Image (cartoon, grey):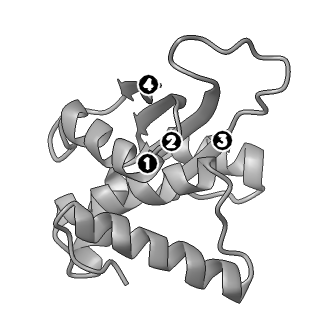
Amino acid sequence: MSVSHNITIQRRVPPAGVPAPAALREWALAALGHTHGELTIRIVDEAESAALNSRYRGKDYPTNVLSFPYDSEGFEETDDGPPLGDLAICAPVVMREADEQGKETRAHWAHMVVHGVLHLLGRDHLEDGEAEMMESEERAILAGLGFPDPY
């Protein structure tokens, strides 16, 4: 059985500095590995990120990436697999962080996609042990894509 995916890209900001949809999909697929399913990557501005962060996390500021895993209970699986969830990636925050942290912008974008997808797959970093495991997985995926250690 082949692994199928449906990765939808939504862009709500001008394209300058935002990686092409093909790159975003490639990075998401690398993080998904053998998991099949559907996800949406929405590239947002600071206002939308701040509104989502406030509504769902109680934090009144924009953030780099928000992950919204689907509760697939009750959803009918399609040929593309179960719905996995949505990512909201804030373009201005990602670009500003890359600059402030001295990172190559494309590498930071890849990290945010991989990080967000891993959250959709149930990984977390609230506890030290979880954080170490998630960061290790991120490093391996990013290295496989040709990017440096993001940490």
Counting labels gives 4
State the image coordinates of residue 106 (x, y, percent, origin top left). Answer: 18, 58
Tags 3 and 1 touching, CB below 8 Å = no
Q: Residue at x 42, y 69 (%)?
A: 138
The first of marks 4 and 2 along the sequence is 4
- Looking at this view, is 10 or 62 the one in front? 10
Which of the labelled discs sits on residue 88, or is there none?
2
- Image spot of residue 58 (x, y percent): 78, 56
Q: Secondary structure at mark 3?
A: strand
The kind of residue on which mark 1 rests is: Gly
Callout in the foreground (1, 2): 1
Q: Residues within 10 Å of mark 2 (few under 14, many from 20)?
A: many
Report the Cα–Cα distance between label 1 and label 4. 11 Å
Secondary structure beneath dot 2 equals strand
Q: Earlier in the sequence, mark 3 or mark 1?
A: 1
Cα distance between the residues tagged 4 and 3: 20 Å
